[in-house]
């Protein structure tokens, strides 16, 4: 055998030896099959709403929320998936939770959760051509900002709503500062309150002036969670708002100048903030709204009460609303009694309802059309 044939033979033997191992190396590894995710809740064709949760080692699982009357026992399936079905739910936005062996939590099959300090609430949304629904109208934009507040030396976050057409029309707009309640955060007014969609729909119907909305975190002092009436927290929020957030928004966005183009409103703890800051900063704000508010102490607004002529001359609207079954009703009546004694002008709206978001969405939808007109 000549050298050339010998070399070819050796090459063929080597290739045959290596080919199986090369095939094995090129073969992709077997992929582990991922379990099918549990999606919850789901709206059935007949209108029923099905909730499901996988908890194979649980002994008891219950469902509770604004769309149920008390707790509903969920039933365990053969695969460890617990389920419960509601025969019908009226259109609306509802908060609910699932409790597993005594531990209350969000629904892990639902990506829609209510922004909270202690998250444990999921959101069920049933559209029904309501004012807070996403309707076929022009829509605004929600912007997110993170910043370091030098006046209080803290990291802060906020959301800004700009009305439909803001990016292209070059117009300037009035500003509303809109504050959340004690358990929530800067994201709650949009994620759960749907303030941006409410404004989109009101503006499209010609019922509200287009406006920019600033939504700040109402807990600049994190330790204030647990004490919604913390005077230190309110004062730190005042400094952050007036010395950091407002100047930042005025620099980045097109705002109409002047106090007549500034409003502040809030719910619960945010109502306390809007009353305390709004009434004592009348060089900045002319429009004030309080929804189911924790009210300020008499000392906090003493100057306002002692100068009714000056106060009334500067306030364009002081709008106070609360539900007749709200636990803050008594102190709200005491507060408006003080306003009456000092002859401070205001609007009082006593409605049905408790201390809850369905009430606050309605209040916002009634308050916003009154602004900047």
Image (cartoon, helix red, strand yellow):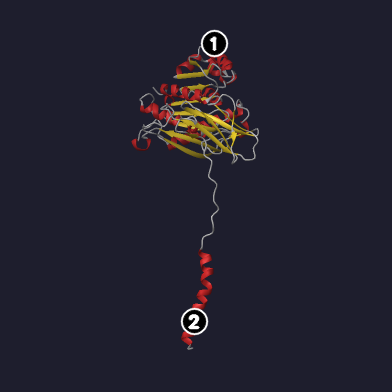
Q: Nearer the viewer, mark 1 or mark 2?
A: 2
Q: Position of residue 271 (x, y in %)?
A: 53, 24
Mark sitting earlier along the chain (1/2): 2
Disc 2 on helix, strand or loop? Answer: helix
Label 1 Cα crowd, 10 Å radius (few <14 / some 14-19 / many 20+): few
Residue 341: which disc? 1
Q: Position of residue 100 (x, y in %)?
A: 63, 35
**Closest to the observer, 309 or 235:** 235
Q: CA distance from mark 1 to mark 2?
A: 111 Å
Query: Residue at the location (63% across, 29% down)?
Result: 226
Give coordinates of residue 116: x percent, y percent: 56, 33
Q: Nearer the viewer, residue 313 or 66?
A: 66
**Is residue 30 depicted above or below 279 in this figure?**
below
Q: Which residue of the protein is positioned furthest toward the bottom in this rendering?
A: 2
Q: Is residue 6 visible?
A: yes
Which image quarter holds the C terminus?
top left
Q: Residue furthest left?
A: 169
Answer left or right for 76 relative to 139: right
Q: Which quadrant holds residue 166?
A: top left
Dot 2 crowding, Cα within 10 Å, few <14, some 14–19, many 20+: few
């Amino acid at each position: 055998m000549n050298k050339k044939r010998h070399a070819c033979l050796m090459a063929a033997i080597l290739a045959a030896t290596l080919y199986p191992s090369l095939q094995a190396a090129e073969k992709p590894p077997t992929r582990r099959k991922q379990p099918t995710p549990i999606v919850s809740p789901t709206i059935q064709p007949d209108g029923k709403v099905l909730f499901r949760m996988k908890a194979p080692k649980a002994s008891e699982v219950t469902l509770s929320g604004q769309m149920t009357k008390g707790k509903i026992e969920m039933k365990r399936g053969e695969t460890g998936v617990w389920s419960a079905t509601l025969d019908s739910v009226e259109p609306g936005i509802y908060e609910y939770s699932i409790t597993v062996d005594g531990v209350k939590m969000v629904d892990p099959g639902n990506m829609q959760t209510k922004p909270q300090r202690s998250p444990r609430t999921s959101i069920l949304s049933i559209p029904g051509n309501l004012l807070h629904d996403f309707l076929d109208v022009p829509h605004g934009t929600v912007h997110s900002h993170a910043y370091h507040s030098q006046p209080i030396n803290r990291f802060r976050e906020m959301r800004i709503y700009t009305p439909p057409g803001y990016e292209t029309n070059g117009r300037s707009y009035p500003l509303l500062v809109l504050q959340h309640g004690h358990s929530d955060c800067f994201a709650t007014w949009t994620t759960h309150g749907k303030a941006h969609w409410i404004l989109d729909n009101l503006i499209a119907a010609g019922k509200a002036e287009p406006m920019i909305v600033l939504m700040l975190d109402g807990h600049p002092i994190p330790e204030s969670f647990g004490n919604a009436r913390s005077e230190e927290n309110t004062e730190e929020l005042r400094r952050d708002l007036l010395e950091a957030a407002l100047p930042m928004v005025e620099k980045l966005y097109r705002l109409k100048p002047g106090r007549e183009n500034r409003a502040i409103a809030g719910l619960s703890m945010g109502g306390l903030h809007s009353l305390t800051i709004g009434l004592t900063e009348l060089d900045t704000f002319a429009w004030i709204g309080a929804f189911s508010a924790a009210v300020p102490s008499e000392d906090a607004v003493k100057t306002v009460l002692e100068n009714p002529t000056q106060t009334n001359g500067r306030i364009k609207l002081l709008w106070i609303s609360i539900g007749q079954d709200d636990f803050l009703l008594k102190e709200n009546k005491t507060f408006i009694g003080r306003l009456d004694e000092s002859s401070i002008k205001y609007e009082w709206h006593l409605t049905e309802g408790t201390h809850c978001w369905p009430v606050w969405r309605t209040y916002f939808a009634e308050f916003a059309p009154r602004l900047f007109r």
